[in-house]
Image: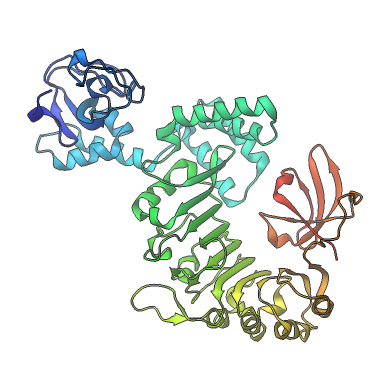
Amino acid sequence: MRERDKPRAHVIEPAKSGTSTCQTCGLPIGAGVLRLSEAFVSDEGRWARSHSYARTPRTRSYDSGEDRGGHSNHDSVSPDVWARYHHLSCAAAQQPFKLRSALAATTLDIPDRAELERAIEVALSGADAAEEKAETRDEYQGFLARLREAPDDDLMLVFGDWLHSVGDPRGELVTVQRALETAEGEAKAKLHDAEKRLLATHRKRFLPERLVATLVWRRGFVHRMVIAASDLEPQTLGLAFASPSFRLLRELAVHANSSTILVAANLPRPLPATLRVLELGTARHGTHGLGQVGALVANGLPQLEHLAVRGAGDLEGLRSATLATLELSVANATEPYSSGGRTAEARPLTARIAGLEKKKLPALRRLVLRVETNLDHAVAAVVETKLLQHLSELVLAGDLSRAGVDLLARKRKQRLALLDVTDCNLGAADLDKLRTHAADTIVEKPSTTATATAAPKKIGEYLVRHKKRPEWGIGKVVAESDDGMEVDFAEGGRKQIRNVEFLEEVEAP
C-alpha cells in the first residue's frame, strides 16, 4: 500500500471492486456498494489485515521486503496502518462507535441512514435476543420486572431455562454460571472455559464497548462492578448500565484513586434502581473528596441497603427509605476535609454526622465508623443525634479511648444487639464497661493464647452474619444440610442459606 493511500480515519466509501470481504459476516462486498473502511494499526504488516490473524505471531521473512538486516526475527515490530471493510449494516451492529463517527463525517448520500442510526442506538444500548423478537419480548420483560423488584434464585433459574428454550445465549450463560457456584476440580475448570467461550463469542451482546471495570457475574448478569475513579466516563458508564447484562446490577464500587476526580459528579444519573450496595472511596480511611453523595442517593435508589462513604463525601440531604447500613470512613474525625469542587466547604466528619436525620433514614440499623484519629469525637457526634437509639449494630474501628467508652456506657437505655470493637484495641476493663451497652455480642480480637486444637463448634453453638444482608443482624446456625445452612437471624428471622460463602462467622461473647 502506498503511503498516500493509507487510511487516516474510519470512513464510508464505495467499494472500488467486488473483491473486498466484510470482516464481520465474511461475505463479499459488491463493487460500488457503500462500506465502512475501518482504519486499524497492525504490528504485523500486511499479514494482519483480517481479524482472524491479527494477534498470531509469525516469523518475518526479509525476502518479502518487510524487514531488513539479514536474519529472521519474531520480536521486532513494524507498526502500520491498514484498512478492513464492513457492510454498513454489519458495522452498525458490531462497530457502532466507528460507524457513528464515519456517518458524522461523510458527505455522501447514505440510503437508509435513519435505519442505520437506529441500529447503532440499539447496538449501543444493547438488547437480548429474546427481547428483540416480538413474540418473546413481553415474557422476557415480565421476568426482568420481577427480578428487578427482588432477587429470587428460583425464578432466575426458571428465567435461564426459558431463555435457553427460545434460543437466547444468555440462557446458557445462566446455566454455566449457576453450575460454577458448586463445581470443584476438573469440572470447575471446564465450566470456567465454557464461561470464557460464551463471553467471547457473544462479547458484543454481553459486554459494553470501552468499559474498563472489574465485573462479578452471577447467573447470567453482572452482579457487582468495581471501577476506578480515573476510568469514570458518564456517557460510557451510562451506556453500560443500559446493557442487558447490567439490568440486575446489585453492587457498585468506585475506588477514588485520584484527588482530582469527583466521584459523585461523574456517575451517571440516575444510577441503576436495582443497586443494593454502593461503595465510594478508598479501601479504608480516606481523605478523598467524593462530592455530593447525599444528593446522588436521595430518592434515586429505591432498593439501596448498604452505603459506604470512604472519604470526604457531602451527606447533606441524604435520604433513603431502605438504607440499613451506613459506613463512614475518614483519617481524622475532626479535621475539615473538602468534599470537592470550588465552592465546597471543608467540614469534619463530626459535622457531617450531626447533619444526619433519623426521619430521613428510617430503616438504618447498622452504623460503621472507621476513623484512624479522634474516633471518640465521631462517637460523641453519633450520641448527640437520635440515630443511636434506633441502631441495632454499631461497628467501631480506630483509636477509641476511655472517653469514647464512657460516652457509650452512659447510654444504657439504648442497648445494641451488637457492638463490634474488634479494631479498637481496648483493654479488659473498657470491654467490661461496654458489655452493659450490648445486649448480645461484643466482638473482641481473637485471643493470642487460644490453642489450635480447640474443639470444633457444633450446630447451634456459633453465630454468623450474612455479608449481603447485614440488616438481618446476627444469626444462629440451627441446621446444616446439602442444601446449605438454616440460620435464625435476630432481625431477619429463620432463613435457608444456600450460598454459605456469604456467611461470616461472628465470635460469641
Residue 184 place in picture, x, y as percent: 70, 30
Tell me if residue 42 can be seen. Answer: yes
**Direction from residue 209 to residue 484 in the image, left or right:** right
> Which residue sits furthest front?
70
Q: Is residue 82 above or below residue 249?
A: above
**Direction from residue 46 to residue 373 in the image, left or right:** right
Q: Nearer the viewer, residue 131 or 72?
A: 72
Q: Is residue 213 above or below residue 16?
A: below
**Direction from residue 170 to residue 210 in the image, left or right:** left
Q: Nearer the viewer, residue 454 or 89?
A: 454
Tally of numbered discs: 0
Q: Is residue 479 above or below residue 391?
A: above
Tell me the quarter of the picture where residue 209 sits.
top left
Residue at 25% x, 22% y: name it.
49
Residue at 38% x, 47% y: name it.
239
Residue 109 place in picture, x, y as percent: 11, 34
Residue 140 place in picture, x, y as percent: 52, 37
